[in-house]
Image (cartoon, rainbow, N blue to C red):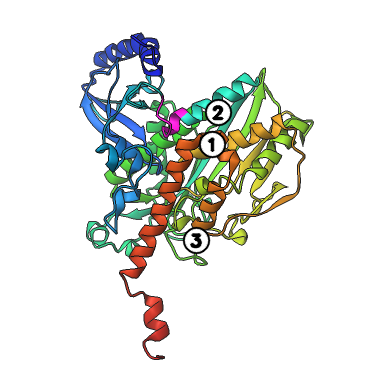
């Protein structure tokens, strides 16, 4: 029998999965949340009895070709990419549990969870699996002698749940959680401290470190900063945090959205996902040089800036993401950098000691897929180091619309090298589907703009 990536991984993981299964049974676990991140930044889940598929299992490939909200409101749930295609009869592919991701959920009696890696029917890695793509760049960093660390800082908006408003599509009428729009306000809602403590307790059980939870500028906007981890673990933790937060909100009569902007531009802040990152070697932060950014750090930063336009489709992947672009509101529109400058695309942050230094990539909104954004950032930074790139102050404007981002993506040699032809074609198909869906929706509606502009004047 020919050995494949799937068969090798299955052999390597079998004993660890069997051991984990027995440990969970001893804890009283009876059900498993089998989970995989899609390309929209959501965690797709099926519930099974506690039993790990040690030799692999079927995976619904359509989850990789699903539009956000599975096509709402224009009823086009799928786009035609490289997997999950109509011409293949929407055939399944294969998947294998990752034993490193097994987690017990003690607050959910009888439940545990595990993440999947996916494979094509021939046993090769699925070219659009975001966990696989990130693992490749993580290994690249390791082969260069570095340990990369990423700390993700999510902003999100909480609302009081109202099923009638949601079912009617009146999301703009939802009531934000808490009173006021003040930063770092402990008393915005009297239940906020207990809510934050409950969230941190659940995440702690899952091994997810929380740096802080604070109120942000804007009605109902909060920030959850996660501790820095190696790239794949950082992205896994981010996906789990979002899932746990949604569950806790439902229990408390709340809703959470990670839309980049859920209120009209100019009224309140949008929601970003700031990526704090650094490289380490032998326990030392290699970005630090006596309180300054090291030469190696400068090259990494130069790579980030140089590749920012090419990968912008991943940093702002939705129609809504471009409503957040506002330099004055700290959502950058240029590929630039500055020391402790929150208006720049990359903020250079010296630490409390001379041995600490990190970069904060401030472009992405909270609506991204963190596996893909981390992959693009790490690939760009490592390119900068390998090419000894020279740091410039400003590399130029970032695309201002999703159409411009699609053009930059499709014309880029860099992203093809980082992600491969299949993924790049698939992501372009997703982007074009977003544009078509929005344009179709506009044509199907008479907007408020049209009534106000033309009702009396033509």
Specify whether residue 435 is in view: yes
Query: Residue 374's mark?
Result: 1
Q: Is residue 75 left or right of residue 136?
A: left
Could you tell me how far apart the alpha carbons at marks 2 and 1 are, in whole angstroms?
9 Å
Q: Quadrant of the C terminus?
A: bottom left
User: Viewer-nearest of labels 2 and 1?
Assistant: 2
Residue 14 drawn at (x, y percent): 34, 11
Could you say which quadrant of the image residue 40 lies in?
top left
CA–CA distance in space, label 3 to label 1: 22 Å
Lower sequence index among marks 3 and 1: 3
x and y percent of residue 142 in the render?
60, 21
* Front in this rendered view, residue 306 or 36: 306
Q: Is residue 62 above or below residue 192?
A: above
In percent of the image, x 45 and y 36: which residue is there? Answer: 422
SS for dot 1: helix
Question: Dots 2 and 1: beta carbons under 8 Å?
Answer: yes
Task: Evaluate whether residue 370 shows in this view.
Answer: no
Q: Residues within 10 Å of mark 2 (few under 14, many from 20)?
A: many
Does dot 3 land on a helix, a strand or a loop? Answer: helix
Q: Residue furthest front?
A: 87
Above or below, 328 relative to 147: below
């Amino acid at each position: 029998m020919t050995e494949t990536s799937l068969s090798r991984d299955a052999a390597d993981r079998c004993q660890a999965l069997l051991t984990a299964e027995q440990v969970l049974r001893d804890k009283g676990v009876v059900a498993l949340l089998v989970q995989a991140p899609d390309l929209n930044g959501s965690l797709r889940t099926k519930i099974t009895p506690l039993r790990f598929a040690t030799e692999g299992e079927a995976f619904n490939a359509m989850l990789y070709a699903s539009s956000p909200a599975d096509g709402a409101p224009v009823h086009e749930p799928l786009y035609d990419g490289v997997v999950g295609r109509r011409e293949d009869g929407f055939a399944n592919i294969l998947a294998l549990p990752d034993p490193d991701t097994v987690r017990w959920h003690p607050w959910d009696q009888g439940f545990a969870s595990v993440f999947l890696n996916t494979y094509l029917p021939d046993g090769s890695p699925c070219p659009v699996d975001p966990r696989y793509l990130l693992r490749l760049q993580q290994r690249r960093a390791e082969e260069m002698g570095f340990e990369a660390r990423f700390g993700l800082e999510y902003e999100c908006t909480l609302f009081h749940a109202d099923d009638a408003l949601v079912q009617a599509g009146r999301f703009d009428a939802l009531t934000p959680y808490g009173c006021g729009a003040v930063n770092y306000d402990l008393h915005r809602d009297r239940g906020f401290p207990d809510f934050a403590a409950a969230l941190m307790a659940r995440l702690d059980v899952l091994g997810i470190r929380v740096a802080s939870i604070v109120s942000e500028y804007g009605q109902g906007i909060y920030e959850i900063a996660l501790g820095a981890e190696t790239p794949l673990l950082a992205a896994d933790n981010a996906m789990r945090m979002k899932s746990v937060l949604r569950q806790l909100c439902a229990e408390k009569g709340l809703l959470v959205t990670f839309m980049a902007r859920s209120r009209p531009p100019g009224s309140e802040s949008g929601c970003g996902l700031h990526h704090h990152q650094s490289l380490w070697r032998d326990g030392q932060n290699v970005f630090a040089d006596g309180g300054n950014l090291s030469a190696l750090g400068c090259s990494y930063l130069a790579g980030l800036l140089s590749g920012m336009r090419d990968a912008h489709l991943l940093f702002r992947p939705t129609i809504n993401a471009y409503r957040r672009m506002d330099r004055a509101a700290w959502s950058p529109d240029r590929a630039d950098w500055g020391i402790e400058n929150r208006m720049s695309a990359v903020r250079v942050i010296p630490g409390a000691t001379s041995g600490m230094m990190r970069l904060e990539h401030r472009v992405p909104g909270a609506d991204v897929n963190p596996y893909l954004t981390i992959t693009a950032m790490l690939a760009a930074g490592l390119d900068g180091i390998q090419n000894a790139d020279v740091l410039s102050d400003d590399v130029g404007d970032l695309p201002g619309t999703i159409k411009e981002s699609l053009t930059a993506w499709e014309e880029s040699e860099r992203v093809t090298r980082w992600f491969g032809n299949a993924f790049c074609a698939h992501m372009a198909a997703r982007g074009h589907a977003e544009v078509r869906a929005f344009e179709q929706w506009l044509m199907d509606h008479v907007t408020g703009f049209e009534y106000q502009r033309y009702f009396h004047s033509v």
